[in-house]
Amino acid sequence: MLSYRAESALYNIMPEFYKSTQKEGRVILKEIFTSDADMVPDYQNNTLTINLHSLSTPRANQAVKQLCAFLNQTETCFPLTNLKLIYKTVAI
């Protein structure tokens, strides 16, 4: 249930920057959740960078780029640490 609520929260913010959210929003989120990502801790700067790999389409990559920007504004810390999460996409 927790995972579904997290997915729904992300889905609900996507219309701000992605027109086809109703048609493709959950598909893009599923692709994000199942694609590769690198986690790079930086203990000196207290950050944990999540590098999301490229998705299947340029439109999906653009949506992920905007989603990363939104999530970075929240300045969320990784649970049970003081590492601030930084989301990036390595897509061109």
Image (spheres, rainbow, N blue to C red):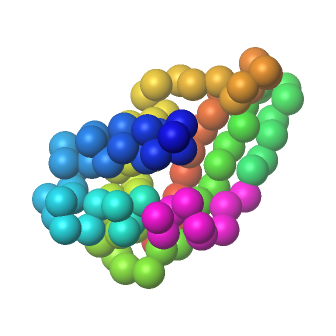
Quadrant in which residue 2 is drawn? top right
Residues in magenta? 30-38
Q: Position of residue 1 (x, y in %)?
A: 51, 40
Q: Where is 5 relative to 40, above or below? A: above
Q: Nearer the viewer, residue 14 or 91?
A: 14
Question: Residue sitting at 37 percent across and 68 percent down?
Answer: 27
Asked if the magenta segment contains residue 64, the reply would be no
Quadrant in which residue 9 is drawn? top left
Question: Residue sitting at 36 percent across and 44 percent down?
Answer: 8
- Residue extending farthest to the left is 19
Question: Residue sitting at 68 percent across and 43 percent down?
Answer: 49
Left or right, 11 with reference to 75: left
Left or right, 75 with reference to 82: left
Left or right, 34 with reference to 45: left
Q: Where is 51 relative to 23, above or below? A: above
Quadrant in which residue 10 is drawn? top left
Q: Position of residue 91 (x, y in %)?
A: 50, 69
Task: Note whether residue 75 is visible.
Answer: yes
Q: Position of residue 19 (x, y in %)?
A: 14, 59
Q: Position of residue 42 (x, y in %)?
A: 81, 35
Q: Where is 66 relative to 34, above or below? A: above
